């Protein structure tokens, strides 16, 4: 079975603060994929990033960075110098060929509110 | 290129009526998913299509729900004899293959009165 846990239900920060969204996953597979999605108040889910289990290199894209650590089964997402436009629900997800017929397992999401 | 589109964007229906929700996936995407999202909640998987294979219907909540995908492209989700608990946003997503990222449409907000 696969499981994705986003323990932080809601986070509130003030603009320009850094914020980290936690994602912990469980899988028995050795090859798997991890994802982050963003759902702004407008409602449309947007794909942000995919990481492969065999590539633990951290990734940075502008103010966004992702820290993948297999040792702790975590795939955390950090927003640096947060902005009001970062306010959204963020979902972490996991998939692998050998479990759940390849379908993604989503976490319950973390609601981030960035106040001006 | 064009993203995933869904229609209608909003649908209000009376309890007991049937509704059809439409999804146009990204061209070339063989994987297509339907999810349901209640207010403030996460994603509830409903059904999944992959190419010409039999659909994975394991998430459909009752036999009032059905879906089809014609010609490997457009999909229709049908809810028969709607109930108030069916009120939610129905999201469609498509992808190049099941394990990879999904691209979501804007959703259809269904309200059953």
Image (cartoon, rainbow, N blue to C red):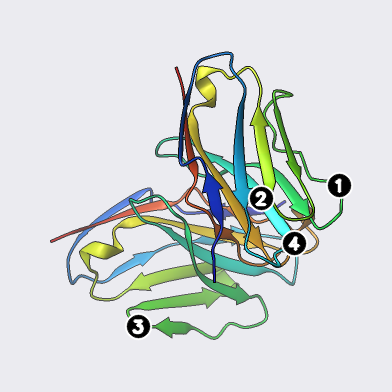
The residue pinned by badge 1 equals B54
- For discs 2 and 3, the disc positioned in front in the rendered view: 2
Q: Is the residue marked by circle 4 packed among few (<14), some (14-19), or many (20+) residues within 10 Å?
A: some
Residue B30 is marked as: 4
Q: What's the chain of the residue with tag 3?
A: A
Say the numbered circle drawn on residue B33: 2
SS for dot 2: strand
Measured in 3D between alpha carbons, the distance from the residue under mark 2 to the one under mark 3, in whole angstroms, is 30 Å
Q: Residue at x 70, y 33 (%)?
A: B60
State the CA–CA distance, disc 4 to disc 3. Answer: 31 Å
Q: Label 3 belongs to which residue?
A: A62
Please tell me whether mark 1 sits on a helix, a strand or a loop. loop
Asked if marks 3 and 1 fall on the same chain, the answer is no
- The residue depicted at 75 percent of the width and 65 percent of the height is A29
Disc 3/disc 1 C-alpha distance (Å): 41 Å
Write down the chain letter for disc 2. Answer: B
Element on which disc 3 rests: loop
Residue farthest along the left direction in this orientation: A116
Q: CA distance from mark 2 to mark 1?
A: 13 Å
Label 3, residues with CA under 10 Å away: few <14, some 14-19, many ≥20: few
Q: In which quarter of the view is residue A78 placed? A: bottom left
Q: Is residue A25 above or below residue A56?
A: above
């Amino acid at each position: 079975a696969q499981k994705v846990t986003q323990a932080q239900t809601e986070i509130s920060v003030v603009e320009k603060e850094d914020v980290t969204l936690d994602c912990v996953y469980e899988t028995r597979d050795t090859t798997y994929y991890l994802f982050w999605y963003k759902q702004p108040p407008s409602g449309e889910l947007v794909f942000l990033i995919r990481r492969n289990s065999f590539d633990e290199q951290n990734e940075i894209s502008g103010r966004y960075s992702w820290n993948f650590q297999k040792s702790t089964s975590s795939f955390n997402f950090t927003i640096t110098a947060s902005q009001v436009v970062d306010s959204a629900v963020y979902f972490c997800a996991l998939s692998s060929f050998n479990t759940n017929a390849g379908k993604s397992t989503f976490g319950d999401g973390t609601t981030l509110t960035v106040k001006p | 290129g064009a993203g995933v589109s869904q229609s209608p964007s909003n649908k209000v229906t009376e309890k007991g009526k049937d509704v059809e929700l439409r999804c146009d996936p990204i061209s070339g995407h063989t994987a297509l998913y339907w999810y349901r999202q209640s207010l403030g909640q996460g994603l509830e998987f409903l059904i999944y299509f992959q190419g010409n294979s039999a659909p994975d219907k394991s998430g459909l909540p009752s036999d009032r729900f059905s879906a089809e995908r014609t010609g490997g492209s457009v999909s229709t989700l049908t809810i028969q004899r709607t109930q108030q608990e069916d009120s939610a946003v129905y999201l469609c997503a498509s992808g190049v293959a099941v394990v990879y990222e999904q691209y979501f449409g804007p959703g259809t907000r269904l309200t059953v009165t």
